[in-house]
Amino acid sequence: TRIITIGGAQLGPIRRDEARSAVVARMIALMEQAARRGVQMLIYPELALTTFFPRWFMEDQAEVDAFFETEMPGPETQPLFDRARELGMGFSFGYAEKAVYDGRLRRFNTSILVGPDGEIAARYHKIHLPGHSEHEPWRAFQHLEKRYFEPGETPYMSTELMGGKWAMAICNDRRWPETYRESALRGAEVLTLGYNTPLHYPLAPEHDHLQAFHNHLCMQAGAYANGLWVVGVAKAGREEDCDLLGQSCIIAPTGEIVAMASTIGDELITADCDLDRTQEIRDHIFNFEKHRRPDMYPMLTRQ
Ligand code: CDT
């Protein structure tokens, strides 16, 4: 067995005017609680440092950029890295990243994986950006990820850290089966997934009552069909008049939920995850080498 204790640090709502330092203090409080429970790797949500700002249309780029980080760690996030290093804990969280890539300033919805030494081991840019790019005033709130971010251009990856293989995905990525399959084919054993999911979906409000069901449906199916541990962590609760789904969970490679949040506030969930349990699935029902037929799925890779 290769047991690693993993924590999901669900965050409750973050106010639009809440200072980064206040959010980081909340994150550190959860980290200290996690340390007391023996957590070795702690996963925070998507865009963990701020409110979910794509819900507002902003014409002034400076106003948008106030939600972005230009350095990681920066002055406000350094205390989180320092505390994690003192505790010897790995962690992962999402943030809005503004940085130079390919010689130009670019903006991504980013997640990082940090080792217990406080060093960034991997960085992921959200691939499936949902929502729209123009102001749509008819909506109760906007979802302007397509306006404020560029889509990631680097495929899902698997990073070796703390004796395991980790992949990251972000929120809407969890609804796409390809996310799990690509990560698993690259050898990942744990997939981290932070999310901000409004309970109201303006394009199909008749599905609003299914948000919690769809959330677990896609992550449990992805875990099982690929023999992965999945750690889904919400930013939850009523954030600036928008209700966000909670139900953060840790899912075993069998598809079973082994830990789940029961509030919509700051809450820690933990599970002792045996990474060798991935083989229960991958050696048998989903033995890719033995049973998978990629030559029979040509449409999957057609552009
Ligand atoms: N953050 C994020 O990707 N949220 C989407 C909301 C639905 S699409 C507007 C999600 O897939 O949960």
Image (spheres, helix red, strand yellow):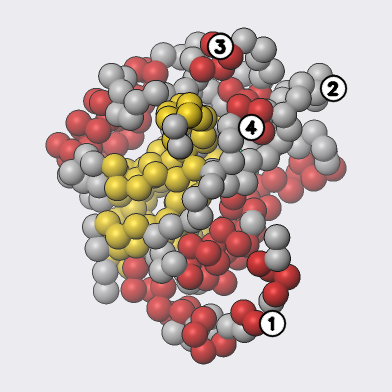
Local crowd at mark 1 within 10 Å, few (<14), some, or many (≥20)? few
Q: Amino acid at mark 1?
A: Met
Mark 2 C-beta to ligand 1 under 8 Å? no
User: In front of the other: label 2 or label 4?
Assistant: 4
Q: Earlier in the sequence, mark 4 or mark 1?
A: 4
Q: Amino acid at mark 4?
A: Glu
Which numbered disc covers residue 63? 3
Task: Find the distance from the CA under tag 4 to the CA under tag 3.
Answer: 15 Å
Judging depth in this view, the residue of 62 and 191 nearest the camera is 62
Judging depth in this view, the residue of 67 and 2 nearest the camera is 67
Mark 4 C-beta to ligand 1 under 8 Å? yes
Judging depth in this view, the residue of 87 and 226 nearest the camera is 226
Q: Earlier in the sequence, mark 3 or mark 2?
A: 3
Q: Is residue 265 visible?
A: no
Task: Find the distance from the CA under tag 4 to the CA under tag 1.
Answer: 35 Å
Which numbered disc covers residue 145? 4
Task: Find the distance from the CA under tag 3 to the CA under tag 2.
Answer: 22 Å
User: In front of the other: label 3 or label 2?
Assistant: 3
Judging depth in this view, the residue of 174 and 295 nearest the camera is 295
Q: Which residue is mark 1?
A: 296
User: In front of the other: label 4 or label 1?
Assistant: 1
Residue lying at 34% horizontally and 26% vertically, measured from the top left: 71
Local crowd at mark 4 within 10 Å, few (<14), some, or many (≥20)? many
Mark 3 C-beta to ligand 1 under 8 Å? no
Q: Amino acid at mark 3?
A: Glu
Q: Is residue 138 left or right of residue 200?
A: right
Q: Which residue is mark 2?
A: 138
Q: Amino acid at mark 2?
A: Trp
Task: Find the distance from the CA under tag 1 to the CA under tag 2.
Answer: 44 Å
Local crowd at mark 2 within 10 Å, few (<14), some, or many (≥20)? few
Residue lying at 41% horizontally and 73% vertically, measured from the top left: 278
